[in-house]
């Protein structure tokens, strides 16, 4: 089997996901979709593998182990909880599993690549936080398989829907930073249109004059569907922290169905994401396609983040 071929187990899980499309999703009350990882069919329980998709070009390894990744970045609060389950073992919660996330700020800039334009008319990057680490972090799941983060609702860049990148790892060294180990799943969290529209009309998000991409038009969503996966498994449940108040932020819950024995292609065998347009400060962002290469001119940090970087650095046991 070549690096780009899905495993037999992945294919079976993808077929199961298609057959469970209607049963595997429910409304969050805000117009979003929540994947249910188990469904009953013929008296048996079927688990759904979260789609493997591209990691995109903005990944930086050896990130801080912490729950709060905000670093003073403006935006509406976002409380994130992932539950990692083993799709090969009846959706058993996976403990001691490193979960890594990263996403852009309210205007579409990524740490490490703030000279890359998000497209449209956008202010210069605000300089808040450490340019090497803001809105990136790792948490380790507890006995119940959950890992939680505190962040802000991401912005967007053309032509992608608002999203969060996720990697689920196995093993490695967990200290102040996470290093080594094996990635077993690379995926993305895709935000529902109602949440994006509500945030886009208010500052700081409204200062980015670029119409957000609709979920149904997003290439990662579409290509995951074309590949036989269940793209709705990448769309989380989002609920307002305070009813009727967008500015108070959201809670987000999502189940990540993984096969702990597989090795992720680290984005090399996942769907792409299109080429953001030129224009705006900093030039042209790179393609978000499979195995995307970080852009020339965007200087990733060398080595581990400094010991004085902000945030909770205590790993979850």
Image: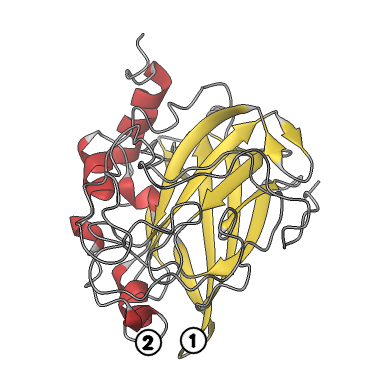
Q: In x, y percent, where is residue 32?
A: 37, 67
Residue that appears at 64% across and 39% down: 62
* 2 or 1: mark nearer the eye: 2
Q: Which residue lies furthest to the bottom in this view?
A: 244
- Horizontally, is 8 left or right of 134 in the view? left
Q: In x, y percent, where is residue 95?
A: 72, 39
Residue 83 higher or lower than 303, as above or below: below
Residue 100, visible in the rendered structure: yes
Query: Which residue position is annotated with label 2?
Result: 202
Q: In x, y percent, where is residue 56?
A: 37, 42
**C-alpha span from label 2 to label 1:** 8 Å
| Disc on res. 247 | 1
Q: Nearer the viewer, residue 231 or 73?
A: 73
Q: What element carries label 2?
A: loop
Residue that appears at 58% across and 67% down: 151
Q: Which of marks 2 and 1 is nearer the N terminus?
A: 2
* Mark 1 crowd level (few <14, some 14–19, many ≥20, 10 Å Cα): some
Q: Quadrant of the N terminus?
A: top left
Q: Find out whether the residues at labels 2 and 1 contact each other: C-beta distance under 8 Å.
A: yes
Residue that appears at 77% across and 46% down: 176
Q: What element carries label 1?
A: strand
- Horizontally, is 36 left or right of 191 in the view? right
């Amino acid at each position: 089997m070549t690096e780009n071929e899905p495993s037999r187990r992945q294919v079976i899980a993808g077929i199961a996901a298609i057959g469970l499309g209607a049963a595997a999703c429910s409304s969050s009350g805000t117009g979003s979709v929540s994947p249910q990882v188990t469904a009953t069919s013929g008296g048996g329980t079927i688990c759904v593998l979260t789609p493997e998709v591209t990691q995109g070009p903005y990944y930086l390894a050896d990130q801080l182990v912490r729950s709060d990744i905000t670093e003073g970045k403006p935006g509406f609060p976002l409380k994130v909880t992932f539950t990692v389950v083993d799709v090969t073992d009846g959706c058993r919660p996976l403990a001691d599993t490193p979960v890594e996330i990263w996403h852009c700020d309210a205007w579409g800039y990524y740490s490490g690549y703030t000279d890359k334009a998000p497209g449209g008319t956008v202010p210069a990057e605000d300089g808040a936080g450490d340019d090497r680490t803001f809105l990136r972090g790792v948490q380790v799941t507890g006995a119940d398989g959950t890992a939680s983060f505190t962040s802000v609702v991401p912005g967007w860049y053309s032509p992608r829907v608002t999203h969060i990148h996720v990697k689920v790892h196995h093993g490695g060294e967990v200290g102040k930073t996470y290093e080594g180990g094996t990635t077993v799943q690379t995926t993305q969290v895709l935000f529902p249109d109602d949440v994006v529209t509500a945030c886009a009309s208010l500052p700081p998000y409204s200062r980015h004059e670029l119409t957000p991409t609709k979920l149904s038009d997003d290439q990662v969503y579409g290509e995951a569907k074309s590949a036989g996966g269940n793209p709705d498994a990448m769309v989380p449940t989002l609920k307002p922290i305070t009813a009727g108040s967008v500015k108070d932020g959201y809670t987000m819950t999502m189940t990540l169905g993984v096969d702990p024995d597989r090795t992720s292609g680290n984005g090399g065998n996942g769907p792409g994401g299109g080429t953001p347009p030129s224009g705006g400060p900093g030039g042209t962002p790179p393609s978000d396609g499979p195995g995307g290469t970080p852009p020339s001119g965007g200087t990733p940090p060398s080595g581990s983040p400094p010991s004085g970087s902000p945030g909770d650095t205590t790993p979850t046991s």
